[in-house]
Amino acid sequence: MPSTRTRAVLALTAAMVLWGCSPVFMRTLALSLSPENSLAMRYVFLTAINAAGLAWTGGWRIPRRDWPRFLIAGLAGMAGYNWFVNAGFELVPAGVGTLVTMIEPLMIALLAALVLGEKLNRHVLAGVAIALMGSLVLFWPDITAATPQAVSGRGIIYLVLCCLGWAIYTIATKPLLTRHSSFTVTAVTMLIAAPLMLGLASEPLPRLALRLDTRQWLEVAYLVTATGLGGTMLWNYGAAHLPSTAVGSFLYIIPVVAVAAGALMLGEQVTVHVVAGGLIMLAGVAAVQFGPKLARR
């Protein structure tokens, strides 16, 4: 049987694959519904599934001492991340915006050191630096491309805040995952965020549902089950069994998968920058995960 660490690494890798494919469906769904309506539509189903799952498993029985952490994770983490990432990418070009979000693993590592007392060893710092260099190479053509207007400072701030939101979620849920299942933590935090996400809709949700075609329903299904529930549960499982600093490094896999998914599903071009940047970013993740083990040999 695989060790707990191996299962955690596999869970996080699977989560990155699911999340890496999601921009393809997020982009097409947001173009047809708007980002706010797309997010609200997904949370209608997430709310129903999570509420039914908690009722079935009894996971809604949360001790009073754990509610402050659940509220922080649900509001600042889940809701904060979703709102700021949508608002940010409305104002900032995708290449520049994705580069900004690559500070997320570093934020997780810093918060883990400050709040949980986890050590920032040289392998973590080296891995984050390598992966950040890879993201720079990956998006260099987008960063250096001539644009008709300057990059929005407000959009950059929103994206930094979305990274902070997910870092808060990761750190706040770490102790909860020792006392509750991955599903319970995922479901409760999503239900806490749900009223804010549903409130984003610019038109009545029944009217939105009536005008969805088959393709849009399939996109919603993927974003609800694979990205929303599946990806977050896998993330929470990995976060429960690995240090937060190591968990954060996996986020650098997302742009690599996203580029591959875009090429396969949308026919987007794969350039030398894409290949080189992706390999460098994966090397950064490998440095964090395997560096300490190799150093002991």
Image: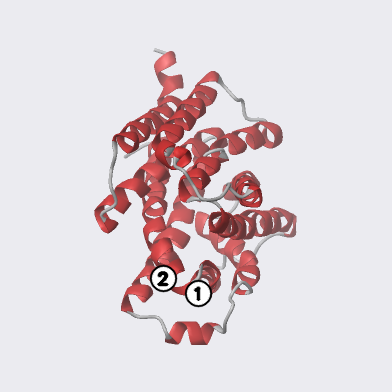
Q: Secondary structure at mark 2?
A: helix
Q: Is residue 134 above or below residue 257?
A: above
Residue at 54% x, 19% y: name it.
122
- The residue that mark 2 highlights is 220
Which residue is the extreme one toward the top? 297
Q: Is residue 250 visible?
A: no
Q: Nearer the viewer, residue 197 or 29?
A: 29
Q: Is residue 283 visible?
A: yes
Mark 2 and mark 1 residues within 8 Å of each other at the beta carbon? yes
Q: Nearer the viewer, residue 188 or 253?
A: 253
Residue at 56% x, 41% y: name it.
104
Q: Quadrant of residue 196?
A: bottom right
Q: Secondary structure at mark 1?
A: helix
**What distance separates the C-alpha of mark 2 from that of mark 1?**
8 Å
Q: Amino acid at mark 1?
A: Met
Residue at 46% x, 20% y: name it.
292
The picture places residue 57, in percent across and down from the top left corner, at 51, 67
Q: Is residue 87 left or right of residue 75?
A: left
The picture places residue 116, in percent across and down from the top left corner, at 67, 35
Find residue 127 and name its label. none
The picture places residue 52, in percent across and down from the top left corner, at 51, 74
Q: Amino acid at mark 2?
A: Val
Q: Is residue 129 above or below residue 36?
A: above
- The residue that mark 1 highlights is 41
Image quadrant holding the C terminus, namely top left
